[in-house]
Amino acid sequence: MDNSARITKVEVEVDNVKRDIDRLYGAIDRLREHMDKGFSEVRREIAVNTRWLVGLTLANTAMILGLSGRLLGLY
């Protein structure tokens, strides 16, 4: 093979690599969007669970205080 044939072969390989890199960037962008959507759903669920946790903690605290008051004869 002479030099021009080798250069042509290298140029074709470089073009193939560039095309593959562009496809990978596109796939990474799509994956990032998908993950962002998934994480937004997880954040929303965490917010709901946190509200439940706070509500249940307040209810348990009120119950314990009420039972303690009843046992101590405060009412």
Image: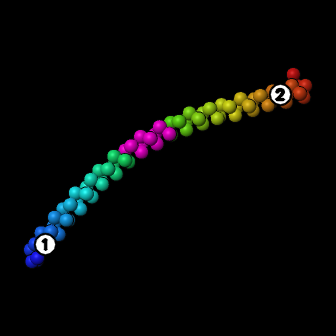
Quadrant for residue 2, please give it: bottom left
Q: Which residue is labeled 1 in the image?
A: 7
Colour scheme of the rendered structure: rainbow
Residue drawn at (80%, 30%) of the image: 65
Which residue lies at the image location 75% right of the left edge and 32% below the top edge?
A: 61
Identify the magenta region: 33-42
For marks 1 and 2, the one nearer the N-term is: 1
In the image, taking residue 1 as reference, residue 72 lies left or right, namely right
* In the rendered image, the vertical position of residue 31 relative to residue 53, given as above or below: below
Near-viewer residue (5 or 43):
5
Q: Choose top left, top right, bottom left or bottom right for residue 59.
A: top right
Comparing labels 1 and 2, the label whose residue is closer to the camera: 1
- Amino acid carrying label 1: it is Ile
Position of the N terminus by quadrant:
bottom left
Report the residue that reaches farthest toward the front.
Answer: 1
Cβ atoms under marks 1 and 2 closer than 8 Å: no
* Quadrant (top left/top right/bottom left/bottom right) for the C terminus: top right
Q: Estimate how packed mark 2 is, as few (under 14), some (14 to 19) or many (20 or more) residues with alpha carbons within 10 Å.
A: few
- The kind of secondary structure element at disc 1 is helix
Residue at 25 percent of width and 55 percent of height? 22
- Give residue 18's quadrant in the image: bottom left
Report the amino acid beneath label 2: Leu
**Mark 1 crowdedness (10 Å alpha carbons): few <14, some 14-19, many ≥20:** few
Residue 8: within the magenta? no
Per the model, the C-alpha gap separating discs 1 and 2 is 87 Å
User: Could you tell whether 6 is left or right of 65 in the image?
Assistant: left
Q: Position of residue 68 (x, y in %)?
A: 85, 30
What secondary structure do most residues of the magenta stretch adopt? helix
Where is mark 2, residue-wise?
Answer: 67
Question: Which secondary structure lies at badge 2?
Answer: helix
